[in-house]
Every structure is written in C-alpha cells, then in structure tokens.
Image: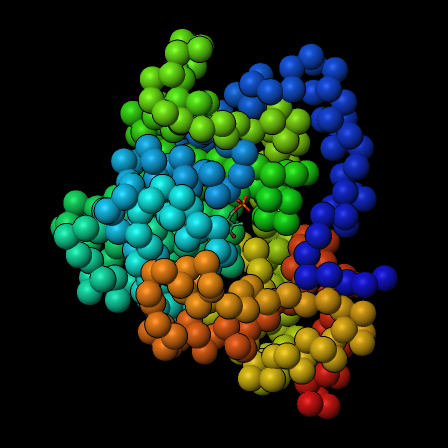
Amino acid sequence: MTIYAWGYLQEYEREREDILDAVDKVFKSGQLVWGPHVTGFEREFAAYHGVPHCVAVDNGTNALVVALRALGIGPGDEVITVSNTAAPTVVAISMVGATPVFVDIHPDTYLMDVGQVAAAVTERTRCLLPVHLYGQCVEMAPLEELAARHDLVILEDCAQAHGARHHGRIAGSMGRAGAFSFYPTKVLGAYGHGGGTITSDAELDAEMRRLRYYGMDEERYYVVARNGMNSRLDEVHAEILRRKLGRLDDYIAARRTAAAVYAEALAGTDLVLPALAPGNDHVYYLYVVRHPQRDKIIERMRSFDISLNISYPWPVHTMTGFAHLGVPKGALPVTEALADEIFSLPMYPSVLGTDQEKVIDALRETLATL
Ligand SMILES: *Cc1c(COP(=O)(O)O)cnc(C)c1O
C-alpha cells in the first residue's frame, strides 16, 4: 500500500465509530446548519485557546477573509506577509481588495524574517500577517513592537499551527485575531472543509459573526446590517471537530514523537532537518527537509511506494495569478532558493511505527545511492 505524505484514511480507520456516531447524531437532530454543535464547538475551541471568542466558518481562506474584513482592511491597504505560504493566505488578502506585500523568510526556520518587516512598512500598511508555517510560530515580539509603533493590527495565519506555542502563548491568541483551517489534513481537521477565527476582542467577534452570516445580526434575522457573505460551518463538521478537539493534544504528542524519530534516524544524512526556533513548541503539521537533489529523491522514493509532497514548490509571488503585484523573480532570494530544495516526509499521528520505519529505510537507501 502506498504511503502518502498525509491523509485522513489512517485516522478514519482508528476513529470510525466515533466519527460515524457524530454524523448520525447530527443527521438525526433535524438541524444541519446553524445549531448547537457549532455553538458548542465555538465555545470549546475558544476555551482551548484561553480566549473568550471563536467564530466558526466554512474554510480557512474565509476565516482570513472574515477577519480581514472585520478589521476594516480593504482596497488601498497593504498587508505584510510571506510568499513561502499556502496560496490561500495571499488569495484572502486579495479577496478583500488589499495589497499583499512580501518579506523574505529566515534561512533556518523558513518562516517570516521579522527583521525585514520594518523596511516594508509604508503609510498604507495596516496589517501584519505572520504565517505560523509547518507547525511553529513566527517570532512575535518584533512584530508586536512594530504594530504598536505604527498602529498596525496583527492577524495570525494559524492554519498549520493548531496548539503550537510561542514562549508559552498559544498560536492565534497573540494577534488581534487568529485564523484557522480545519481542512481534513490539518492538525485538527474536519471531514470536509472548515475554518474558524479566535479573538479576545468582543467587537471584532460581533463583526466577524455578522460577516459570516450575510451581514445579519444573529438576533435580528433577515436584516442585513452590513454587506456580508455566507461562510458558516456545517453542524456535522462542528460535531466531528468537537470530538477531535478532545484528542488534539494526543495528535500533537504523536506528531512530536514522530518528528523526534525522524530527527534521530536522519541526523547522520545530508538532509537539512527542520530547525526549531527559540521559545517554540512545534506541532509538526509538516516535517520539511531540504536537499539540493530533491526531485531525484522524490522520484526514487516513489519506487518504494512512498509519495512525498512539496510545500510549496512555487513561491506565491512567482505565480501567474499574482503577476499583477509586480514582484519580480529574484526579489525574495531565500524563498525562491528554498522552493527548489524542500520536500515533506509523511507526517500524521499514526505514521509512528511501520509506516515511518518504511519511510526511513527507503530514504536512507535513496540517499546512499544518489
Ligand atoms: C490550509 C491553509 C489555508 C487555507 O485553508 P482552507 O481551509 O484550505 O481554505 C490558509 N493558510 C495556510 C497557511 C494553510 O496551510
């Protein structure tokens, strides 16, 4: 059987009864949209983060959109982020009409190089959007200082960092808001699309609630207070997520163990292994390694029936859909060099054991015969 970089099937095998029970319970409830399971999930997801508010939405991209819109960010505003990210980070900024501005990444962590942000701030900058990529947090103190100095808001993209911590603070609780994706493969995933935001700001919470519900106030149905969108989470995904939230810390622990196994087994090879930045508790959404002969390695691993992934093979600023931003090739040298050399090893809680042993053996053999 092929070993994939990720997937939900291994999990479904182990949790099938509970997932099907959640589906049955919701389907029997008579309420598929807008019910107690969404409300319950919002309460529990907020509590997990030690914040008062969570707004569940239909995917991670719209979590960013709802947050950006509620923060009043739109045409004419600049949002500083990175090009080494999932394209939806940048799609969301564009969807609200704002302009994404990229800084390069740190050569060790592949996360936003926070030392470059000050130089990217202009009088149009409104928002800093750090992406806690691969499962560890961007260094926040320099961003917080800049935000205070220039009156900017910080919105965290936490789509890959459920439960990650930075100097003890949990991802999503450090900025004005944090946006999450519950795409099936994420550290906390639904069985379909899902997303959510968290915040400690009651006004922002109310605005995000309105926006995801056509712009209506929840207690005044049918009256649009401001032009919104339809971006609600389904009851069935909410109930599945509630149950999985109770297991989130176990998933994270298993991912950390798997990362430690990889680190020990691959320490003597010429793969560059993931670097952990100071103060970070990594959740290893992805285990990203680097090698100049990346494409050859991926091809050879396929002969062992192991399918590896690249996150991400093309920096966002080099994509046709973002050509209008006018960021030339060569503008972000660390990001561009990285994209040619990185790949991800299979990483999911149940990779521990046989799957991981197969991957390590195949990888050792591949590296020895390059
Ligand atoms: C997955 C992801 C998103 C988008 O989430 P969707 O639920 O797929 O819309 C945004 N940002 C990052 C960094 C992601 O990994």
Q: In the rendered image, which quarter is residue 225 located in?
A: top left
Pinpoint residue 305: horizontal percent, then vertical percent. 81, 69
Image coordinates for residue 37, horizontal then vertical, percent: 59, 21
Q: Residue at x 38, y 75 (%)?
A: 329
- The residue depicted at 68 percent of the width and 56 percent of the height is 6
User: Which residue occupies the foreground of this view, 269 or 73?
Assistant: 73
* Relative side of 307 to 205, left or right: right
Q: Quadrant of residue 199?
A: top left
Relative vertical location of residue 234 with respect to residue 280 in this rendering, above or below: above
Q: Nearer the viewer, residue 146 or 27?
A: 27
Residue at image location 48% in from the left, 43% down from the top: 61
Classify 80 as above or below 370. above
Q: Locate residue 177, reporting x and y percent.
A: 35, 39
In the rendered image, the quadrant that contains the C terminus is: bottom right
Camera sees residue 279: no
Residue 364 position (above or below residue 188): below
Q: Is residue 324 left or right of residue 221?
A: left
Relative to 204, residue 5 above or below: below
Residue at figure coordinates x 38%, y 16% from the top left: 224
Tell me the quarter of the picture where residue 71 sits: top left
Residue 284 horizontal/vertical position (percent): 56, 58
Residue extending furthest toward the right: 1
Describe the colour scheme in one phrase: rainbow
Nearer the observer, 43 or 110: 110
Q: Residue furthest bottom?
A: 369
Can residue 5 be seen here? yes
Quadrant where the N terminus lies? bottom right
Total numbered badges shown on the rendered structure:
0
